[in-house]
Amino acid sequence: MGMTGARRRRVWRWAVIVWVLAVAVGGGLTLWVQDSMEPQGPYVWEQTKPGPTPDLPPCPAPDEGGAALCVYTDAD
C-alpha cells in the first residue's frame, strides 16, 4: 500500500534536485534580465551647455592666525 523507504528517498532526492535546478535557473535569469535593463556604458558625466567660469572674489585672509572659511553658491 505505501512506498518503500528506498523509493521514498529516491522521490525526495529528485524533488530536491529539481528544486535546486529551478532556483539556479531562476537566479540566472534574474541576473541576466537585470543586467540587460541597465543602460550601456560608458558612463560619463558631461555638461551639454557649460557656462562661463564665474569671477569669484578672493577669500579673505585670516586675522590673528585664525582660519577663514569661504562659501560660494550658484545664484542663477
Image (spheres, helix red, strand yellow):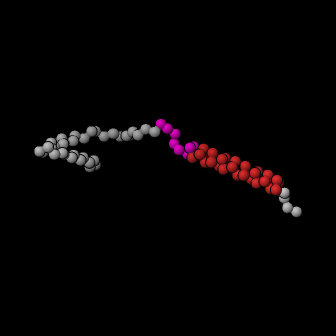
* Quadrant in which residue 9 is drawn: bottom right
Residue that protrudes farthest toward the bottom in the picture: 1
38 or 51, which lies in front? 38
Q: How many labels does the image show?
A: 0
Residue 19 belongs to magenta span: no
Residue that lies at the very extreme toward the top in this rendered image: 42
Does residue 4 appear left or right of residue 47 in this picture? right
Residue at 11% in and 45% down: 64
Q: Residue furthest front?
A: 5
> Would you place residue 47 above or below residue 1 in this image?
above
Give residue 12's position: percent from left, percent from top. Answer: 76, 54
- Magenta stretch: give its range: 35-42
- Which residue: 21% across, 41% down? 56
Q: Nearer the viewer, residue 17 or 50?
A: 17
Residue 34 picture location, percent across and down: 57, 46
Q: Main structural element of the magenta stretch: helix, strand or loop? A: loop
Q: Residue furthest right?
A: 1
Report the front residue among 5 and 11. 5
40 sits to left or right of 69: right
Residue in the image at 52% along x and 39% along y: 40
Across and down, in percent, residue 36 comes to 57, 43
Please give left or right for residue 52 compared with residue 24 in the image.
Answer: left
Q: Tell me if residue 42 comes above or below residue 37 in the rendering.
A: above
Q: On the rendered structure, is 19 left or right of 65?
A: right
Q: Residue at point 88% right, 63% down?
A: 1
- In the rendered image, residue 49, in percent from the top left (x then y), is placed at 35, 40
